[in-house]
Image (cartoon, helix red, strand yellow):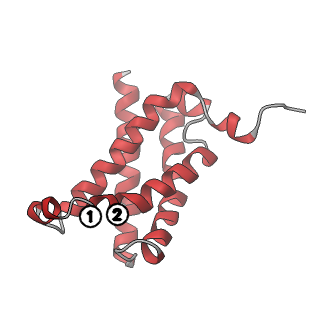
């Protein structure tokens, strides 16, 4: 019997740079998306607005990504293993974000928004990780 817990097998210390980069990539994506719909002046006048944009997706990410293995030992090895893991983690994490956005936070979850977020989130996270392994 293996004495390491399920979550312990899903979290590797070497993945800390990936975790930081993933969060920054998601925040950048959500910020750019918000700026395409809101003027910077609006955001300056409503400083908590961006937090409400970030919250559902960051909550979804923090809940789901470790379970799927985005920060497992395999995620730290190569881009070939890490990029698919981050995309497989993003899809259910984004689904949690959509549910939270539709029922807890403001913003809703229109079908076009869902498609855009799934695609661009996959590109942002996968692209960041590919760049990380290329520069590492």
Q: Is residue 27 above or below residue 94?
A: above
Q: Is residue 90 visible?
A: no
Q: Residues within 10 Å of mark 2 (few under 14, many from 20)?
A: some
The image quadrant of residue 13 is: top right
Mark 2 and mark 1: span between their CA atoms?
5 Å
Q: Residue furthest right?
A: 1
- For the N terminus, the image quarter is top right
Quick check: 64 left or right of 41? right
- Relative to 49, 66 lies left or right: right
Residue that carries the numbered disc 2 in the rendered image = 52
Q: Give yes or no for contact between labels 2 and 1 (Cβ–Cβ under 8 Å).
A: yes
Q: Position of residue 95 (x, y in %)?
A: 51, 65
Where residue 91 sits in the image (x, y, percent)? 50, 58
| Quadrant including the C terminus | top left
Number of numbered callouts drawn: 2
| Residue beneath the point at 35% across and 39% down | 128
- Residue 131 seen in this snapshot: yes
Identify the secondary structure beneath mark 2. helix
Which mark identifies residue 136?
none
Which residue is painted at 37% across and 62% down in the image? 117
The residue that appears at 78% across and 32% down in the rendered structure is 4
71 lies left or right of 32: right
Q: Position of residue 86 (x, y in %)?
A: 49, 45
Compare residues 107 and 93 and report the one nearer the observer: 107
Identify whether 86 is placed above or below 91. above
Residue 74, image x and y in percent?
60, 32
Viewed as shown, does residue 97 lie left or right of 127?
right
Q: Quadrant of residue 11?
A: top right
Residue 49: numbered disc: 1
């Amino acid at each position: 019997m293996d004495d390491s817990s399920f979550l312990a097998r899903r979290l590797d210390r070497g993945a800390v740079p990936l975790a930081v980069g993933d969060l920054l990539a998601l925040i950048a994506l959500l910020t750019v998306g918000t700026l395409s719909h809101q003027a910077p002046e609006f955001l300056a006048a409503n400083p908590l607005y961006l937090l409400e944009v970030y919250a559902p997706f960051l909550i979804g990410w923090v809940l789901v990504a470790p379970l799927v293995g985005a920060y497992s030992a395999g995620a730290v090895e190569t881009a070939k293993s890490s990029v698919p893991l981050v995309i497989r983690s993003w899809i259910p994490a984004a689904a949690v974000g959509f549910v939270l956005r539709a029922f807890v936070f403001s913003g809703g979850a229109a079908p076009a928004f869902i498609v855009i977020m799934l695609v661009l989130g996959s590109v942002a996270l996968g692209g960041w990780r590919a760049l990380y392994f290329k520069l590492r």
